[in-house]
Image (cartoon, rainbow, N blue to C red):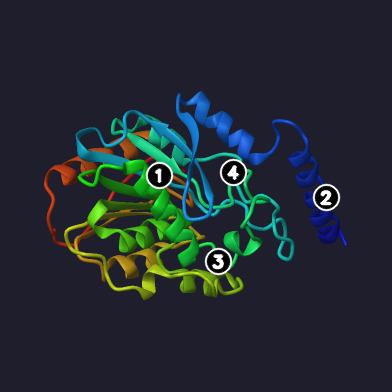
Amino acid sequence: MPAQFHRLWKIAFLTLCLALPGCAPHLRLDRQARQLGLEVGRVSGTGFQHRIYRKGALCTRGRVHVYLEGDGNAWLTDHVIAPDPTPPHSCLLPLMAMDPAPGIYLGRPCYHGLAQTRPCHPDLWTRARYSQTVVDSMATALEKLMGDRSCRAVLIGFSGGGALAMLLTARMPEQVAGVVTLAGNLDVDAWTRRHRYSPLDRSLDPARLPPLPGHIFQIHVSGGRDDNIPLVSIAHEVARQPGARLLVLPGMAHTCPDGPVWRAILAGIEMLEQQPGRQKNLVVHVLDRQD
């Protein structure tokens, strides 16, 4: 009975929050972006609108860093789908703000207060969250933003955004220079089995696709204390990817790296952008202070 009461209270609280001005998660995320000095906007994809946060003139020196958010809050409880899956806070936005490269945060279809617009359906943030429909719309939006075909992107994805980074790269390999995943969901089927979730049967799975082309550099960051997407799952997928690097942060749970570690990763990204080409697979253990 107490567990049932807790679930009902959570649903009531979140429903009330969505109705209050400034409390809705997409408004809180917009506020976080503005406080970090990011420009808030919107771009159309394939039938969907996408929220964007941008920093600097895109494609300066032929490059842009594209940040892809995690899954957010797809469910209110085990059996109740959230009316708005947008996370109220992002660990990615501060990383984007400290990145010296021009950057864009590309939202998913139906997130950021757009869940009630056509043709949105709850499947698009539950069982079809990584579907071809989602990938195609995000790819179209990104192509519009990049414009110049000589511009190449580095896709940076957190958690479920890591799955989308891999899927988008497979969809548009000639426009992507590299992929960086942070606690990325690189094997969707293994993840659902581990947590006994319902299968994402309308989603694509990076682990079921061929390896990415060798000219695309890959950095995959895994936390040693991550119980959501454990190191063993990420390492298994990294092993089959050409040129992939695995950075293990022993003290990190399921979150983004802290500032000093992220600055070191950014330095590595810049080096790889300047020296394109296939690299040998490398496993690096990084001792960090994250608790």
Which residue is at 23% across, 56% downward?
A: 174
The quadrant the N terminus occupies is: bottom right
Q: Nearer the viewer, residue 228 or 32?
A: 32
Q: Is residue 173 above or below residue 41?
A: below
At label 2, which amino acid type do we have?
Trp
Name the residue beneath numbered marker 4.
Answer: 112
Tell me the number on the disc at residue 9.
2
**Are there few (<14), some (14-19), or many (20+) residues within 10 Å of tag 4?**
many
| Residue underneath mark 3 | 128
Label 1: which residue?
Answer: 67
* Category of crowding for the residue at label 2, using alpha-carbon neighbours closer than 10 angstroms: few (below 14), some (14–19), many (at least 20): few
Tag 4 or tag 2, which sits nearer the N-term?
2
Q: Which marked residue is nearer to the observer: mark 4 or mark 1?
A: 4
Q: Which of marks 3 and 4 is nearer the N terminus?
A: 4
- Which residue sits at x=46%, y=61%? 229
Q: In this view, does 22 lie above or below 237?
A: above
Reading the chain from its start, which is encountered first: label 1 or label 2? Answer: 2
Q: Earlier in the sequence, mark 3 or mark 1?
A: 1
Q: Could you tell me how far apart the alpha carbons at marks 3 and 4 are, in whole angstroms?
A: 17 Å
Instruction: Give, as a three-letter code, the residue at label 1.
Output: Tyr
Identify residue type, mark 4. His
Going by the image, does 200 lie left or right of 172? right
